[in-house]
Amino acid sequence: YRSLFENMNAGFVLFEVVQNEQGIPVDLIVIAANEGFGKTTGLKLKDSVGMYLTHVLPGIEKDEADWIGTYSKVALSGESIQFEQGSELLGVYYSISAFQAGPKQCAVTFVDITERKNAELDLIRMSRIMKNSQEIAHLGSFEYVAATQTTIWSEEEYRIYGLDTDGPSPEYSVMLEKCIHPDDAKLLHDTFMEAMQNQKVYELEHRIVRPDGSVRWVYDKAHPYFDENGNLLRYVGATLDTTERKRLQEELEMLNAELELKVKQRTAQLESANKELESFSYSISHDLRAPLRAIYGFSQILAGRHRASLDEEGKQYMDYIVESSIRMEQLINDLLNYSRLGRKTVEIRPVSLKKIIDAIYDDFKPQVDEIGGKLKVHDNPPVISADESLLRQIFSNLVGNAIKYRRPESVLSISISFETVPDGVLIKVSDNGIGIPAEHCEKIFNVFQRLHGEDKYPGTGIGLANVKKAVSMLGGTIYVESTVGQGSTFIMEFPNKNPESHE
């Protein structure tokens, strides 16, 4: 027997039953063994022959009676047996066969099946992981076998449909009738049959009805497999429960619809407000100017014809009327300009800041030269995406304010610099004028916000409000850093998205 297994990757051992005086088996003795048995037990062949089973395989005391009883029964009765045995802890598995080899003798073979057993265990573990993953993702799977006309569902597939996992998977016709939403049954059948006839992937999102009457959304996708004659062999697919995603999608659609409605309402309100503003502007331009011109005209007539008959107090009051009329005219003009600015159509295109600064310099050069001031432009002005007329208005207001709010005891110095920042450009307009108190650095951009009396610094207080609105219309931001008695720096940041070269 030993020679029979010498060239096989298997262990072999020949036992003889040892009986007591009453003929009861009490142990097994090794008569012969091959090298494979030595690998199994860790014993050399010469050491194992003649040894009792309890000595050959130490540590089997708890199973000793089973071992002795099993192999003794084979040796004495001639009954052959086969079974698998091993330990997941040790990672060793064997397929064991035992048969009668002679009087009171039992031959046992040990075939190493560790690799196959580990593969089976890995398959079981992977199956468990896949099962858990399907439960977590609410993803079921199914397979149809054409040869047997049977459908196999995963446990999660049953749970998605609300069916008992112990029951059979429903046939296609029964599923259409009882599991699919009545409004989706025809669409599902037509889509599925088209996919099978054209040998393409079937996929569809539809509704199902559970036995408790609840409705859920699912997404099905199945791959069919055909033989060389175009006959369907099977199709394998998956079902994803999309109820929660569908609910969120419907909520999002409702929110979008509400948002669109609010936008339409706000747009209508804005259009109405713009019309009212236009009407208000027209009223200011025509209705208010008419009596204002009358007041100014009659006051001029009175001043020309009857000034000599007035005392000093009367003359002073007359001058107040004329000056107030002139100032009122300026306020009306500035207010109209502020109103028109908000309704201006913005034309964004590449604009050369050098061109803008050169024009501003030409406009203010006579005033700057007259007071002995300096206007300095740093670096090379870049090209940015903006509206040219709005940029002119911004720089014109800022440079004009620098001239107006200068300190008489110092030589005026105006500086314009540029800095490229991520996705934009930073522009700074600095002066060495009277400065702005910190608590007023935000208020100065409000309409009619004045920090000084008109007798000292004439104006209506709308200039910086126009600047802020123009900057905002260009998508930019503006703020000021200032120290009283030292000057101010107006800092603007504009977006600059790939402007083309423009000189």
Image (cartoon, rainbow, N blue to C red):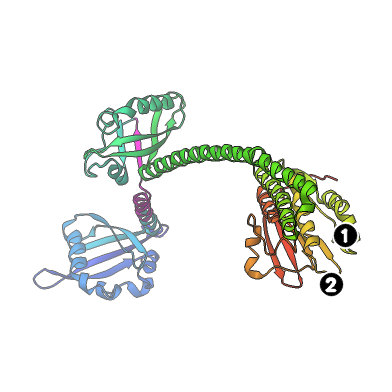
The residue identified by callout 2 is: 409
Secondary structure state at the residue bearing disc 1: helix
Q: Residue at x 35, y 39 (%)?
A: 217
Q: What x and y, as percent, mark residue 270?
A: 54, 40
The reply to whether residue 409 is visible in this rendering is yes
State the residue at coordinates (22%, 38%): 211
- 88 vs 203, left or right, is left
How many neighbours does mark 2 have within 10 angstroms: few (below 14), some (14-19), or many (20 or more)? few
Q: Quadrant of residue 245?
A: top left
Does 57 sit left or right of 281 as displayed? left
Q: Does residue 498 appear left or right of residue 378 in this picture?
A: left
Instruction: Report the magenta residues as a range.
Output: 124-146
Residue 2 is drawn in which quadrant?
bottom left
Between 151 and 327, the residue placed more toward the observer is 327
Q: Looking at the rendering, in which quadrant would you find the C terminus?
A: top right
* Residue 449: percent from left, percent from top: 64, 59
Choose between 311 and 171: the one closer to the eye.
Answer: 311
Magenta span includes 476: no
What is the three-letter code of the residue carrying label 1? Val
Magenta segment's dominant SS is helix
Give 316 or 365, whichever is nearer the viewer.
Answer: 316
| Secondary structure found at label 2 | loop
Whether 17 is drawn above or below 120: the answer is: below
